[in-house]
Image (spheres, grey):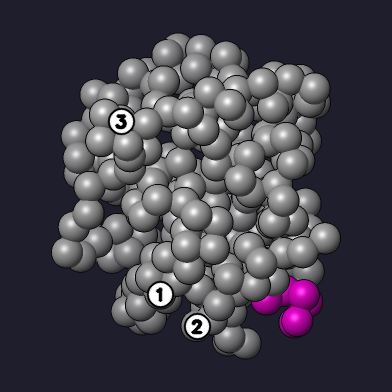
C-alpha cells in the first residue's frame, strides 16, 4: 500500500529525524493537554459516540462530513491564520534549556512541512480536521509501529470534520484557541510519525518503548478509550 503520508511526514520532520535528536526529543515529550475539548468531558464524549462506533459503522458519516461547508463554501473547521505561531516555543519549553532552541526550530519545520500533506490530500489550508487526522494517524503509527496507508487518510479527515463541526466546545472556542489546537495537533502527530520512521533507520528499544507509551497516552486521552481498540481503515476510525 502506498504511503505518501509517510514520505511527506518524514520530509516535514527531516531535522528531527536526523541521527542525533530523536532520542533527546522522545525522552522529554510531556503528556500535554489536547486542548479545548477537555473542558467538558460529557459533551466531548457524546460527540465521539455519535460518530465513532463499530468497524462496520465507521463509514456512516463520511457523506455528511464531505457535505459540511459554510455559506462561503469553506470547511467549517478551517481555523484563522496568524503571522507566527507561539505553539512551537510553548512545547519546546518542556525540554531542557540546552535543547529548546533546536526543538523549537524542529517543531516549526513540522508545521511548515505539513502544508505539503494538506496539498497532497486536497485538505483546505488550516483545516483543523486535517490536523486532528494527522494527530490520530501519527499516534496510531507510533503505537502500532506501522506505516499509515494513504487510502486511510481521506476518510479519517472527513470523519474528524464531522465530529469537530458538531462539537459545541469547538464552536464556542476563540480563534486563538482553535489555532493553538491546530498547531499542537500537527506538531504532535508529525512528531510521532517522524520518530517512528527514524527508528526504522536506527532502532533503539528504549526510545521505541517510550514512543509507544506516548502514542498510547495520546490516543487514550483524546479518544477516551483503550488504545488497543483504535482501528483506522479506508472507512475511517473505529473502535473494536
Q: Is residue 199 magenta?
A: yes
Which residue does the image show at 69% across and 71% down from the upper left?
197
Horizontal arrangement in the rendering, residue 239 relative to residue 174 (left or right): right
Query: What secondary structure is the stretch in magenta mostly built from?
Result: helix
Which residue does the image show at 74% across and 56% down from the upper left?
149
Q: Work out whether 120 lies above or below 152.
A: below
| Residue 209 vs residue 121, the one in the foreground | 121
Disc with the residue nearer the chain's start (1 vs 3): 3
- Residue 108, located in which quarter of the rendered image? bottom left
- Residue 27 position within the rendered picture, expressed as x and y whole percent measured from the top left: 56, 66
- Residue 47 position within the rendered picture, expressed as x and y whole percent measured from the top left: 50, 17
Which residue corresponds to mark 3?
70
Q: Is residue 187 magenta?
A: no
Judging from the image, what secondary structure is the residue with disc 3 in? loop
Which residue does the image show at 43% across and 28% down from the upper left?
68
Residue 203 in sight here? yes
Q: Quadrant of the C terminus?
A: top right
Which residue corresponds to mark 1?
109
Q: How many angstroms separate mark 3 from mark 2 (CA)?
A: 37 Å
| Residue 202 vs residue 2, the one in the foreground | 2
Residue 96 in sight here? no
Mark 1 or 3, which is nearer the eye?
A: 3
Q: How many angstroms separate mark 1 from mark 3 (CA)?
A: 30 Å
Q: Are marks 3 and 2 in contact (CB under 8 Å)?
A: no
- Residue 65 position within the rendered picture, expressed as x and y whole percent measured from the top left: 51, 29
Which residue corresponds to mark 2?
15
Which residue does the image show at 47% across and 62% down from the upper left?
119
Judging from the image, what secondary structure is the residue with disc 2 in? loop
Q: What segment carries the magenta color?
A: 198-203
Mark 3 or 2, which is nearer the eye?
A: 3
- Residue 56, located in which quarter of the rendered image? top right
Q: Work out whether 106 lies above or below 170.
A: below
Amino acid at each position: 500500500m502506498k504511503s505518501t503520508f509517510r514520505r511527506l511526514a518524514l520530509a516535514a520532520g527531516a531535522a528531527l529525524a536526523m541521527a542525533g535528536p530523536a532520542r533527546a526529543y522522545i525522552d522529554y515529550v510531556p503528556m500535554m493537554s489536547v486542548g479545548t475539548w477537555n473542558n467538558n468531558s460529557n459533551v466531548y464524549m457524546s460527540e465521539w459516540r455519535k460518530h465513532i462506533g463499530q468497524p462496520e459503522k465507521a463509514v456512516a458519516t463520511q457523506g455528511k462530513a464531505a457535505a459540511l461547508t459554510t455559506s462561503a463554501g469553506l470547511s467549517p473547521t478551517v481555523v484563522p491564520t496568524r503571522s507566527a505561531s507561539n505553539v512551537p516555543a510553548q512545547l519546546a519549553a518542556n525540554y531542557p534549556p540546552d535543547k529548546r532552541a533546536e526543538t523549537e526550530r524542529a517543531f516549526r519545520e513540522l508545521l511548515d512541512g505539513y502544508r505539503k500533506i494538506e496539498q497532497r490530500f486536497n485538505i483546505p489550508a488550516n483545516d483543523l480536521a486535517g490536523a486532528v487526522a494527522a494527530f490520530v494517524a501519527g499516534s496510531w503509527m507510533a503505537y502500532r509501529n506501522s506505516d499509515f496507508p494513504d487510502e486511510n487518510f481521506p476518510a479519517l479527515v472527513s470523519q474528524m470534520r464531522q465530529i469537530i463541526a458538531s462539537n459545541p466546545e469547538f464552536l464556542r472556542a476563540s480563534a486563538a484557541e482553535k489555532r493553538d489546537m491546530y498547531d499542537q495537533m500537527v506538531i504532535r502527530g508529525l512528531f510521532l510519525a517522524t520518530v517512528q520512521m527514524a527508528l526504522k533507520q536506527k532502532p533503539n528499544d528504549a526510545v521505541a518503548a517510550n514512543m509507544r507509551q506516548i502514542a498510547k497516552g495520546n490516543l487514550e486521552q483524546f479518544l477516551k478509550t483503550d488504545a488497543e481498540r483504535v482501528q483506522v481503515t479506508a472507512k475511517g476510525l473505529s473502535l473494536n
